[in-house]
Image (spheres, coloured by chain):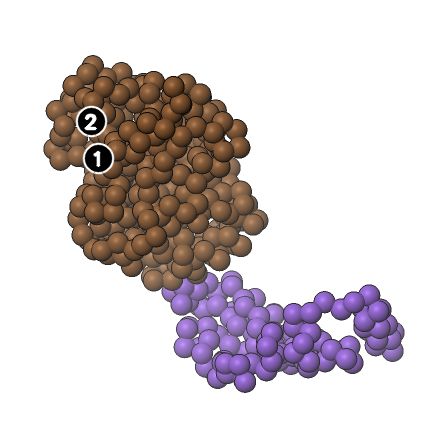
Amino acid sequence: MAASKWRLATLTAIVDRNRLQNDTCVKDVMPVGPLADKWRAFGWQVMDIDGHAMDEVVRALEAARAARGAPVCIIAHTVKGKGVSYMEDVAEWHGRAPCAEEAERALGELREAVCD
Amino acid sequence: MTDAPYLYLLPGAVEHLRAGTLLTAAPGQATRYAYAEAIVALGRRHPDVVVLDADVAKSIGTTAFAAAFPERSFNFGIAEQNMVAAAAGMATTGLIPFVSSYAVFLTMRALDQVRNSVHYPRLNVKFASSHGGITAGPDGPTHQGQEDLNLMRAIAGSTVVAPADPATTQRATWAAAEWPGPVYLSFTRDPVPHLFAPDYPFAIGKAVVIREGSDATIVAIRDMVAQALVAAELLAARGLSVRVIDCHTLKPLDETTLLQAARETGALVTAESNIGYGGLGSAVAELLVEQYPVPMQRIALGDTFTESGPYLDLLEKYGMSAGHIAAAVERVVGRKRA
């Protein structure tokens, strides 16, 4: 409300929409409903993107920079823990730090993915 | 009455003290309005000062700042958490935000942002709270800031100031702008008497002896300084010489002035219109018990919310009037070893 009241077009919010929270899935804890409509109701311009597609991320940020009149919200749909097999889409990893062994395995998987 | 050894008091205030009319007939002003005047003058001097409000600008008087500097005034509506978070952001750009609201809303609704967004990164945000302690009076318990000083004292790196009269409120506002990092200021809803002359040596962190005395010391904060002065007069009539300290800065506590009072007078009473957990009484007790234990008693709000009612009636009903302070002084003096 404040951002649209003062027409903060240079303000960009990015929602990491990974659908998980500390206890479990957002939809089971407290569903947030139509997120884009909610932001629009507060006076924001909204874009939905695939948060793992870098071309979409870059395009959205460029569009946000060019925006006039109202702040911009980018809803980036993502998978939490992306790229680490045992973390992907598992709510437990919202609030837990990996032990040294788990961290080594995660980093190994990410290194492999980057090198491929 | 005796010829009391007052320091830095206005002649008119001394006359009212001696006549027993300080609380009923002396001219005064709510310190929220003194702040509202000071912030306009401060805004003229400092172009970086901005004021953030949350739908009580009219009540506090910061509408005057909005009229003088419309481009530096931001009213967030009833959204204190957003207001404090935005103030943190503004401070990162070099602005000096004065966040104005009621004590209960700033320190409880927005406490997360006050702690994590402002104090943790040590951002230069000033909090200007009205209705501190139980001074909200007829506005009722939902609007009483009876925990404001207590909560703010518990935050790492906080500076907590509650001036006793309009003149020192204006000086506290200017001093807050100069002080590096966050400062919390607590004001009254209701008028307090004009007490201090221009020679009052105001500095954040420096408590001031405003009445000399040798039998005991009353250490008071904000609105309770006036009550403490009246109590000292009552006690003078009963033959007790009582020192009074205006401890306007709860944190950092002026340990030197307080320990000197403990050594020289041998008994202390603290007076605050906040709840008695973690505020002025607690701070002084922690200091004395570790460094110089003397008989001490705390005058504060007990484990209760108050009724709605006139502020002075509430002090009487909940045991925080000048009469209650005087009785507490007599008790601690009685506990002193000969």
- Identify the chain of the residue marked 1, using the numbered disc in the image: B
Q: Please give the name of the residue rendered at 25% of the width and 43% of the height, measured from the top-left corner.
A: B319
Q: Residues within 10 Å of mark 2 (few under 14, many from 20)?
A: many
Q: Residue B107 vs residue B118: left or right?
A: left
How far from the left and from the top, in percent, is residue B164? 30, 34
Indicate the amino acid at tag 1: Gly
Q: Secondary structure at mark 1?
A: helix
| Mark 1–mark 2 CB contact (< 8 Å) | yes
Q: Nearer the viewer, residue B45 or B329?
A: B329
Q: Colour of chain A?
A: purple
Quarter of the view holding residue B39: top left
* Front residue of this view, candidates A32 and B177: A32
**Cα distance in 3D space between marks 1 and 2:** 8 Å
On residue B196, the disc is none
**Residue B323: mark in rendering:** 1
Q: Quadrant of the N terminus of chain A?
A: bottom left
Residue B52 image position (x, y, % from top left):
38, 52
Chain identity of mark 2? B
Vertical placement of residue A101 versus B323, above or below: below
Furthest residue in direction front, as rendered = B338
Q: Residue at x 84, y 69 (%)?
A: A101
At numbered mark 2, what does the secondary structure look like: helix, strand or loop? helix
Using the rendered view, name the quadrant where residue B128 is placed: top left
- In this orientation, which residue lies closer to the viewer: B221 or A107? B221
**Residue B142, percent from left and from top:** 29, 59
Q: Which residue is mark 2?
A: B234
* B102 shown above or below B240: below
Quadrant of the rendered image containing residue A78? bottom right
